[in-house]
Image (cartoon, helix red, strand yellow):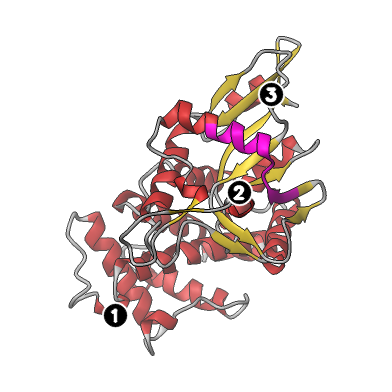
Amino acid sequence: MLEIEKVFGESPHGRVVVTYRQNATDVPLPFAFVLNISRLIGGNSIEISHGLILRRAKTEEIKFVKEIMKSVFGSQFTGTLWEDRPPKSGRGAYVKLPAKQWRYFVIEIGDHIEELADLEIAFTIAECDLELGLVASKMKIANRSFPVCTYRPPQLFQSLSALSSRQHSEEGVGKILSKADAEHLGQVYAKLRRYDRNILDLAPVFKQLLELKDLPYFSPLQILGYFAILESILTHQPNPEDRYDSITRQITRKLALLDKRWSPHLDYSAFGSATHEKIWSKMYAYRSAIAHGATPDFQSHLSLLRNKGDANGLLKSTVKQVIRHCLVEPQLIADLHNC
């Protein structure tokens, strides 16, 4: 059960708690709604960790989610995101799916509500990048237990806006999750819960990652935020008298070292035969253009990066991979930061 003091003391701030009457019987408990899954491979449920089951939502859970969405956003984000198939051509009518194919998926929490904060971080840094929307649970207020729904309005709005904008894209609204994806999520979650925080304190990094979700998807400020997180983990204040100690050189050199230690390696397939050094030189030219208010020129100066989608994808996946490696070798990352 959640304690009200703990919920409002958590970072990032901005969490909303909606309470229901104490004897409410129409509030399903407890579960967390996952925004961006289209289907599971091999069944309707997958265990991520002991006591945390990802599965298709039940009828009463779907009803609860739809009521919350309507109360918060009106008709802006309707069941279309989870109940309809968009036209393949980008034009035409949406097709209503049968209820058994709706894309409402939840995490069955059971007695593990206290672990949900770590699970949200695991979702954020895992390769599949799942999005938690809202959580239905119970909260202790003045020694009384109430059914509650918790969510963060800015993050929820931006996540739903991004999903809505991708309805007509090849990527689609949701992700197809396999058993291997779930195993990866479980491994990340387990490492997150047991890594040595005395060697490397990642709490500020996790806070910043969640706060970036309050911004529009891949807005210039969000891009600069991802660069800032990468730099905060891997770089020290450069020596102005040593041109080989610049932030760009530190990032390029240290990522090259890490890429020899982890698997899979950073995916540079979108950039042809360009070298690691050349790619990150252009990535920092991209960063500089954004930071100075210029429009990144992917037609000439930044043509190696092809487009902002590929550049942003590389940046985000790199940040997540670095953070995941922090959980494996925290001492190495701490040493890299200082060298």
Query: Residue 222 lies in magenta, yes or no?
Result: no
Q: Amino acid at mark 3?
A: Asp
Q: Position of residue 63 (x, y in %)?
A: 60, 33
List the residue tagged with mark 2.
99
Which is closer to the viewer, label 2 or label 3?
A: 2
Q: Based on the displayed image, in which of its 4 quarters is residue 166 positioned?
A: bottom left
Magenta segment boundaries in residue numbering: 53-66
The disc, 2 or 3, on the residue closer to the chain's N-terminal end is 3
The percent position of residue 228, horizontal first and vertical second, equals 41, 54
Question: Along the line of sight, which residue is nearer the eye, 227 or 82?
Answer: 82
Q: Which residue is mark 3?
A: 26
Residue 315, percent across and down?
42, 65
Residue type, mark 2 in image: Ala
- Which of 146/114 is in front? 146
Q: Considering only order in the chain, which callout, 2 or 1, is on the residue closer to the N terminus?
A: 2
Q: Is residue 317 left or right of residue 334?
A: left
Name the residue beneath numbered marker 1.
304
